[in-house]
Amino acid sequence: MILDGKCPTGPIEKSWDKHRFDTKLVNPANKRKFKILCVGTGLAGGAAAASLGELGYNVDAFCYQDSARRAHSIAAQGGINAAKNYPNDGDSIFRLFYDTIKGGDFRAREADVWRLAQVSNNIIDQCVAQGVPFARDYAGYLDNRSFGGAQVSRTFYARGQTGQQLLLGAYSALARQVKAGSVKMHERREMLDLVVVDGVARGITVRNMVTGEIESHWGDAVILATGGYVNVFYLSTNAMGCSVTAVWKAARKGAYMANPCYTQIHPTCIPQSGEHQSKLTLMSESLRNDGRCWVPKKKEDCDKPPSEIPEEDRDYYLERKYPSFGNLAPRDIASRAAKEQCDDGRGVGPGKRGVYLDYASAIGRVGEDTIRERYGNLFEMYEKITDENAYEQPMRIYPAPHYSMGGLWVDYNCMSNVPGLFVLGEANFSVHGANRLGASALMQGLADGYFVIPYTIGGYLTTVTPGEVKDDHPEFKKSAEEVKANIDKLLSINGTKTPAELHRELGKVMWNNVGMARSKESLTEALEVIPKIREEFWNNLKVSGSGDEFNQQLENAGRLADFLEFAEILTKDALHREESCGGHFRVEHQSEDGEALRNDEDFAYVAAWEFKGAGKEPELHKEPLKFENVELAVRSYK
Amino acid sequence: MNLTLFVWRQSSPQDTGRLEQYEAKDVSPDSSFLEMLDEVNEDLIRKGTDPIAFDHDCREGICGMCSQVINGMTHGGQERTTVCQLHMRSFKDGDSIYIEPWRATAFPVIKDLVTERASLDRVVESGGYVSCHTGGVPDGNTLPIGKPVADYSMDAAECIGCGACVAGCPNSAAMLFTSAKVAQLAVLPQGKPEADRRVKAMSDEQKKQGFGNCTNHYECQASCPKGIDVKFIAKLNREYIKSLF
């Protein structure tokens, strides 16, 4: 099937304004008759729930954490992009649009990206109004920093805690609506099914993670803002609770999964220190503004302390390979370059999987105090984890899974192919194409939540009767019974392997075979191994305790069960995409000097997969991508 | 290294709870405290024992989910460090480690080391925000905010809402938590119009939620993994008194 993104036509500059005008409005008096469910309370979900509550809808919001303030958006450090052009350095909405399309390696929809760039400026204003303490200069004006993949300074930041401050802004807006009674918060709830009645999303089934109770919730529309899926790699920079579960439950009910193979490997993470490791820690990409990446030129120097390697024996490989962007090359390129150096035997640190990020020249140029002011918290975090002082010796970094550009397929209204199911933020596939630029995730989450969904959901709601299907419908009972049966099944296996052990096995396959460099061979092998792990999971899993209590192992097991089905689709998508683009690098498709080779002729489309059951062949649906405002070009940062 | 753990086990809010002893063997000094507990739990599961429940999520020291009292100190007592960022190299081979949940009336135990901290959300809901609408706000540069004011506000805004200040306080007061939000917003031009009603509402809500009062022990500041300064409590008191006139 050819999918239609329902993008507005006409000049792109007017597309969003025109669409907003063309979208039907819900009468203010009627809004209170509708109930909207919002799953996830990060930047996208929190902002959406708060904004929709304020408009007068009844919103029920859900999160698995103990408070809406804890979603993993909080961990974003570097900043948020906007096309304000405050520094007068040549930025514009068009340039942000262009950079995002190019950064995504021409695999995103033009109209969606234009809208994102357009509303980026509103986001900054909104956050300032909420009391988000962005960095400012002595005159009192907002400060900007530069970021990978852009040649203008358009990133707004709040020390190294921008995500935290923006999330607390959204959380405070949400708290205000909770107080007003328009939003009802349900904390410590995990969504375990999407209830679909006659092809339309009508509600969700959740597990109360404290009591184990299975609850049914009905809504006239369901919003998923449940983040990304890179914990499929086991070790990633995501929070421990991040999972594909909510998204996957929707996929099992017919929602298409788009471009799952587009995963982002972030270049500046702290290298793994041993098998005990439960997660990887990211350090903001902004570190690359002043840090210089290098490895020893000679393999025999790799064990020497960095201070003993003279300047001429250091290979500043990013500056060498990409002279115009240098250390600010986009994430996919910087990550792959680090991997290449380590594959070449010139990596440093334990296991030789690391490269140096050196501040010596920046400290010499602007002084240690300035560096401390810019990155103090990151240096502190680095020292806590590694016991090394990065003011005195270079940091060691290595790429780690970080973000998923792929996600549930949505049209221009952020609605999936299942009517009534909306998907926001990282959970959808829409704006980042095959690679996301730094400081764009926060922008997308808040754009979707504050400025897109409040308009587009109205258009859908005008077509439904409020409260037409409620939780007394038999589908809700059926869904709850299925959820309970699945939990009982997990608890009854009583094998020998823990969820963490099996997750680690899956992660290893995914990282080695479906990670930064993929080949037909590695992917085919993964497709043989994943079903075996899945089989072992269902035959040899050990989960203690019962389903009627607080049971973290049961939660982990349920999430892993979904990852084990999803991993196969991700790998199949990677195998089918016979090209290299953005975060998806197929070794068969590279130029002589190792750069990604895109295939616009055959693959300029969104691949949306319809799940047909575990172990069954999923069906591929395509949405062709049209580029009318930018020219498809080789993405060069040289 | 090898360690002996004494861990608070409590199966439900109704259970009385007790300390139980476990051995942690071959612990890597490079692992984090939570990774050490992960390993202990893996062992317990294999033995068929209920693993130790503890709250955690980002494991980067920013989400505020992790919450343990270690050897009598919140987050283990290392300066500006959450439990998830505490590493085993700060312990010695053969150490005994006592691990307990946050203890405060306003934070009832759910299970083992997991507590209910919704009371902090209620305090924020009572007024910890600027009542601006989505959209319809002026340009971000319309009101200049001097760097010292922006920095002061940011210092306060760094609070991660973990509740260590409450757990560390002999009175189980949430004054540091509340004051950080009050101070962050009170100095900004955007937060000034509602400063009076905010400080009153949040102060009242603290009482309602069962938090105690401040008697200047400064344990909250010492407990805080983000180093939030008690000067914000002074600011809270000042704002409160101002609101009465």
Image: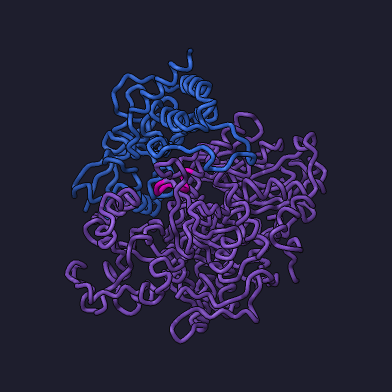
Chain colours: A purple, B blue
Identify which residue is drawn at 32% across, 49% down: A376
Q: In the picture provided, is A549 more to the left or to the right than A622?
A: left
Give above or below for B77 relative to A328. Answer: above
Which residue sits furthest left? A308
Q: Is residue A209 visible?
A: no
Q: Is residue B210 visible?
A: yes
Front in this rendered view, residue A295 or B220 = A295
Which stretch is magenta?
A159-165
Front in this rendered view, residue B173 or A210 = B173
Spot occupied by residue A161 in the image (x, y as percentages of width and height): 42, 47
Quadrant housing residue B96: top left
Give above or below for A513 relative to A47. Answer: below
Q: Is residue A284 magenta?
A: no
Front in this rendered view, residue A248 or A211 = A248
Spot occupied by residue B101 in the image (x, y as percentages of width and height): 37, 35
Spot occupied by residue A78 in the image (x, y as percentages of width and height): 43, 53
Identify which residue is drawn at 54% across, 40% down: B142
